[in-house]
Image (cartoon, helix red, strand yellow):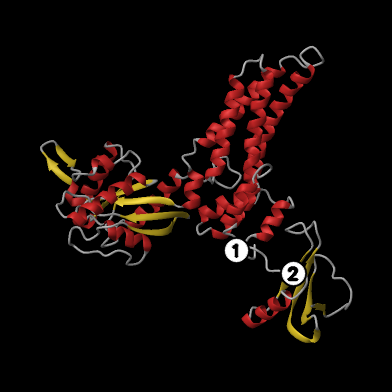
Amino acid sequence: MVRPHKNKGVTPEPWRMERCRIVKPDNESEQLDDGLAVYFRGPRSFTTEDVVELHLHSGRAIISSVLAVLSQLPFCRPAEAGEFTRRAFHGGRLDLTQVEGLKDLINAETEGQRRIAMMAAGGTVRARFEELRSGIIGCLANVEALIDFGEGEDIEEGVYEQARSRAQDLLAAIQTHLKDDRRGEIIRSGVRLAIFGPPNAGKSSLLNFLAQREAAIVTPVPGTTRDILELSLDIGGLPVIVADTAGLRITDDLVESIGIERAQNAVRAADISLCVLSLPEVLVETPEGPSLMMPPGLETLIAPETLFLFNKSDLSSPSAHQQVLKLAGARGQHSAWVASLSSGEGTTDFLSGFAAALHDRFNLGEDEFSAEMPLITRERHRVHLESARRFLQAFLDTSPADVVLGAEELRYAAQALGKVSGLIDVEDILDAVFKDFCIGK
């Protein structure tokens, strides 16, 4: 079917791209295409098997005719979804974290997602989990030595104490990873941001500003937004799922009340929230001086990490801008900006500050080798890491007299980490991992 233009009848040289004619096996005079072919000889191929790649012209008729001919060849069939990557996994080319990283890399839409995926696909996640697992196996080796030989047979004094000390360090490292605020999972799936505030403060205008299009209806009529409108955006390289919610106020309107309840639930469920207020309406003069007057129903939703945008700055003086930021800081709300979404005043500073606040909250570090990069990107990673933590703690709680039980706990801890990379017992999750891959992978 593949005939080189030169050296006819000679097996193609591995890893060398050659020009060739694609012909029908039963009629070599009928040429399907003039393309390129590369022969990858196993195990030095992606799948670790012998592989031939055909590079064809992209016309639909050409591809269809070549696929039709291939389907007639003995022992030849279309690949299943993710089958090439699955073969690479079974051949030892990739571990399970690299497979997941490759899948995420294909689906990455932002710089943050690309970096997280590249860390896994490139083997950094594998190396960091393997470092933890190797440390546990080292502890297990010390304990097993005590079991096999006892303290009286050329075993260095204090071996068990060394194992315990190392296990304590490993436990601390695992606990640090588990207390990462789920940054890896959030960045992989998208940061959920809820925009909330009173009616007519500019929430929908903010959504339109972030989306750079008219995604939400904006009118001067209070209660225009009655349901949650969500958009997926790239803000400073981070994937952000922005939810525009109904204006929070006391109302007798049944439909609007339902929207307000949904808005409150969305704010509570969000990874981060942004409160939009009308600057002229919340900055009031009192006998004691300027004061911030929060609209009713907002205080219970405001947390120390809540972001603030004081909108409609074009309707107030520069001194008022400074006053409102000072008053917000006194309340502990240090991530606050003043802008006018209608005139554009201050929006550039807001957008850069907002992106910086997101990066501070979901810090990725300088590169994929940084210790600040989150290790856990999937719930199953967290489950196995938590299991390893429990078994390590159980080992540390075991009496030195029960070294056999202690060794068993260490063995379970090593097995739990082995499940992350797919070294053991992962057949039950392989179908779930590969089912969303495209055919060509």
- Which quarter of the image is occupied by the C terminus? bottom right
Q: Residue at x 53, y 58 (%)?
A: 108
CA separation in Å, label 1 and label 2: 19 Å
* Residue 241 to residue 78: above or below: above
Residue found farthest to the bottom = 29
- Which quarter of the image is occupied by the N terminus? bottom right
Which is more toward the observer, 258 or 240? 258
Q: Amino acid at mark 1?
A: Cys
Query: Which label number is shown at residue 438?
Result: 1
Tell me the quarter of the picture where residue 254 sits.
bottom left
* Residue 293 to residue 258: above or below: above
Residue 149 position, x and y percent, is: 79, 18
Q: Residue at x 70, y 26 (%)?
A: 140
The answer to whether 377 appears left or right of 29 in the picture is left
The answer to whether 209 appears left or right of 425 in the picture is left
Tell me the quarter of the picture where residue 205 sits.
bottom left
* Residue 255 to residue 39: above or below: above
Residue 126 position, x and y percent, is: 65, 44
Q: Nearer the viewer, mark 1 or mark 2?
A: 2
Label 1 SS: loop
Which is more toward the observer, 48 or 361? 48
Q: Amino acid at mark 2?
A: Cys
Query: Which label number is shown at residue 76?
Result: 2
- Residue 385 appears in the rendering: yes
Label 2 SS: loop
Sequence-wise first label, 1 or 2: 2
